[in-house]
Amino acid sequence: MNAVEIETAISDLAFQPFDAAEFPFAFLAAFGNNDIALKRLRTGNTNVSDVPGGVLQRKKIHIAACAEGSVGQTLKALRASPATAKAKAKFILATDGLTLEAEELLSGETIACAYSDLPNHFGFLLPLAGISTIKEIKDNPIDVRATSKLNKLYVELLSENPGWASSERRHDMNHFMARLVFCFFAEKTDIFNDDGLFTRTVDQMSERNGANTHEVLETIFRAMNIKNDERINTQPRLPVWASQFPYVNGGLFSGSTEVPRFTHMARTYLMHAGGLNWKQINPDIFGSMIQAVADDEERGALGMHYTSVPNILKVLNPLFLDDLRTQLTEAGDNERKLLNLRKRLARIRVFDPACGSGNFLVIAYKQMREIEAEINRRLGKTQLGSEIPLTNFRGIELRDFPAEIARLALIIAEFQCDVLYRGQKDALAEFLPLDAQNWIVCGNALRLDWLSVCPPTGTGVKLVADDLFCTPQDQTEMDFANEGGETYICGNPPYLGSTWQTAEQKDDLKAIFDHRAKSWKSLDYVAGWFMKAADYSTKTDAAAAFVSTNSICQGQQVPILWPLIFSTGNKIAFAHTSFKWANLASHNAGVTVVIVCISKYAKKKRLIYSTNSNGEVAVKEVETINAYLVSGVDVIVDKLLSPPDERTQMDAGGKPVEGGHLLVTEEEKQRIVAKNPGAAKFVKRVYGASEYIRGEIRFCLWISDHHEQEAKADEEINRKLNAVAALRLKSPKDATKKGAAWPHKFEEVKQTGDEIVTIVPKVSSESRGYLPVGLLPKGSIVTDLAFALYDAPLWNMAFIASRLHLVWIATVCGKLKTDFRYSNTLGWNTFPVPLLTEQNKADLTTCAENILLAREIHFPATIADLYDPDNMPENLRHAHERNDEVLERIYIGRRFKNDTERLEKLFDLYSKMTAAAAKGKPAAKATRGKAH
């Protein structure tokens, strides 16, 4: 369940008659527990509560419904309960149906409220659903509640007005919802000069069954589009009750005022939404949540879109806010310096070319207003109006509803800042009418000219539309006064790897990259924003910082994208290495991202931020940041066809292409051998990634050319080989068709079948501290789901099993989703290895042997079992730590302090290795020995 669904369920529960016996189960159901889990609790199978009337859910909550007036006493009993501690409950909750008290045991935070007021505190309990609660929602859940009510209204209206759900009319529906949001906010903040004017008027003037609600709303909207001095002569004349509403316009109430028809239920939802305290709306939270209301595909994720302020500030602070605060500190009370900073603030433009509902822009605006307010305080001029115009906060958004919500969110943020810093009276005096200029452009950011949307000096064509939603989508040029101050580009563009891009999105990237690079089709969609930002900065002084999947700084995308960006003169000014960009989805959902800032005017000292496992952020000043977000030499790692030293060549395993006929199960093997014992020599154990890591058992037919006729004499084997030949002949690929001539073998054969094999799976979990690598028994066959070293000296394995190698692979090879993706040409061949002495090789061989022996002790545990990060055996851990110590002493004479130091050293060695190769120096080669 998402946050909005939980709020709905809690609201429904709070308004139902209280049933003490049923309450604990209804409460748990509201937080996503299924019928099976509740049934077990009801029957007592999993309920180990020792408090009368209590229900205890392990690792979650201990609840008790109690007699009237005994809530505090019952909560105390729950806290003291041995069962609470034993079950590791996170919360305790007691209620008598009149009042309710709850406590989060770890933090000691509590809530105490009327039972009916529980929906206003549901955010406190969201961790019960696995949702990481942010402080803004925990303390003030109004944003989720408002989204919930509007979502119900939206769905009900579309059900009654199916024509409004069509693509032709959906923008009308979205415009209507934007108008409602404004009205709800305005009536609670004195903008309408009367608390509750909008909701009360609709309630008084519309019929209970909703029949004429649309007419009442149309009249109100029409009133807000007519200037006060023009209302007397307006036809049809405004009724007295509608004349109470002020002139608003600003493009919000102009154009068509048509409203969808209401049912009784829709009218009820409207009244419920109006009853909320919209004065407390947080525009950055609410905007990012409500954008999903109008999107059929995203509605199931309601409440999950919001990204916390601290995460957004990871972008905005180092981009420009930290510099502003430093200047404020240095200014002290110096009037001239303070006025210069105030002027600088007024000229800064913040541009989000994938703005969604505008939360980056809203946060930037609020932070800048806070700095400006402090300047005014030091100057003794707190009454001054703001010189920071909303039109300096530009955005591009593909969909019209989030674009309009972004504009509304900024308008609301401006009003709230005016109230906070200047007072309600001054804020109201300057709020209406709204500015008709639309500084949030609706369109495709990868197709629009960013210099027209956010010009360096404000030149361009001013476009002002009567109806914002009817403005042509090619509206890209605006004339907003600006003297050419700083421009900061920021945001969280859509990521979308190449596999998941639509044809239109592929065309977007083609328009940007087709004339620059041949391999652009493998780029993530977000790469388009980086390239557009780099191009933009060639025309004006600008810095751009985007949140991105870390894949653009790993693996095959690096040599495609970053040389293009660097060729524009841009450098990486700061970066935040991989961390989880979490939202409100359950189970701490979030994608692993990086933040990268590019600029042509980067300072001499660059900043690399990193987040440790405890969520603490460290920052390091460095001279340069390369495309892999590592300090040191600015290099791009390219594939090598072979190692440049005496390491063994690594190849992918054989490619079967056999349709399930050469690969056989254990049962099939037994059946074949039972009928023909001589056929046993044709069946060998086969390994891919899952067979090696999880211990799955599979076999394959492995038949040499000189045994082909003997094998075909076996009826079942011959039938399988004929099936392989038929399958390959049907393939559209010429190489596969040729393989029909040798159906007794894999299509691609990489081994004889008699080697000792060192296996490295192509894909493995990122949760392990070491890459899975090991020796297979002689005669094992490896498929193309793994790489292999054949008859390699064992010291090769010591390198692959090291922490040093893992961080290199994670950085230069990239990942498949969140798993490590190994590459022989990009990861193994490029891995920098210092010149090894015979003693070094002997020491590393011993380390590899010790790792293998440590595993053997725990037979039949699988690699997955042994390398479970929470259950790794101590002897195996010690064997790896010894391997790391021996190897790292070869590199620098001691253990590396951390992964950052490891990567810095590896990139330095890689740079020297490639420089030597470029000068034509021969790489050290040695005769490859047999495996130990």
Image (spheres, rainbow, N blue to C red):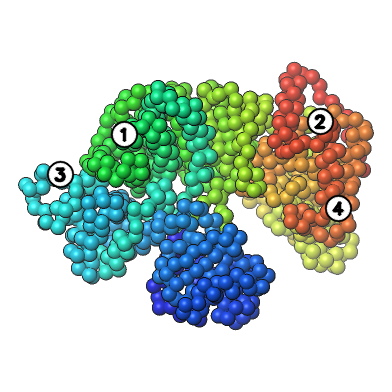
In this picture, is 894 found above or below 867?
above
**Dot 1 corresponds to which residue?**
384
Taking depth in this image into account, of 4 and 35 the one nearest to the observer is: 4
Q: Amino acid at mark 4?
A: Asn
In this picture, is 162 found above or below 924?
below
**Dot 3 corresponds to which residue?**
227
**Dot 4 corresponds to which residue?**
875
Earlier in the chain: of badge 2 and badge 1, it is: 1
Q: Residues within 10 Å of mark 2 (few under 14, many from 20)?
A: few
Residue 132 appears left or right of 685: left
Earlier in the chain: of badge 4 and badge 3, it is: 3
Which element carries disc 2, helix, strand or loop? helix
Q: CA distance from mark 4 to mark 2?
A: 26 Å
Q: Amino acid at mark 1?
A: Leu
Earlier in the chain: of badge 4 and badge 2, it is: 4
Q: CA distance from mark 3 to mark 2?
A: 77 Å
Q: CA distance from mark 4 to mark 3?
A: 81 Å
Earlier in the chain: of badge 3 and badge 2, it is: 3
Indicate the position of residue 155 as horizontal and vertical percent values: 35, 62
Residue 388 appears left or right of 754: left
Q: Quadrant of residue 63?
A: bottom right
Q: CA distance from mark 2 to mark 1?
A: 60 Å
Indicate the position of residue 660 as horizontal and vertical percent values: 71, 58
Q: CA distance from mark 1 to mark 3?
A: 28 Å
Q: Nearer the viewer, mark 4 or mark 3?
A: 3
Q: Amino acid at mark 3?
A: Lys
Q: CA distance from mark 4 to mark 1?
A: 69 Å
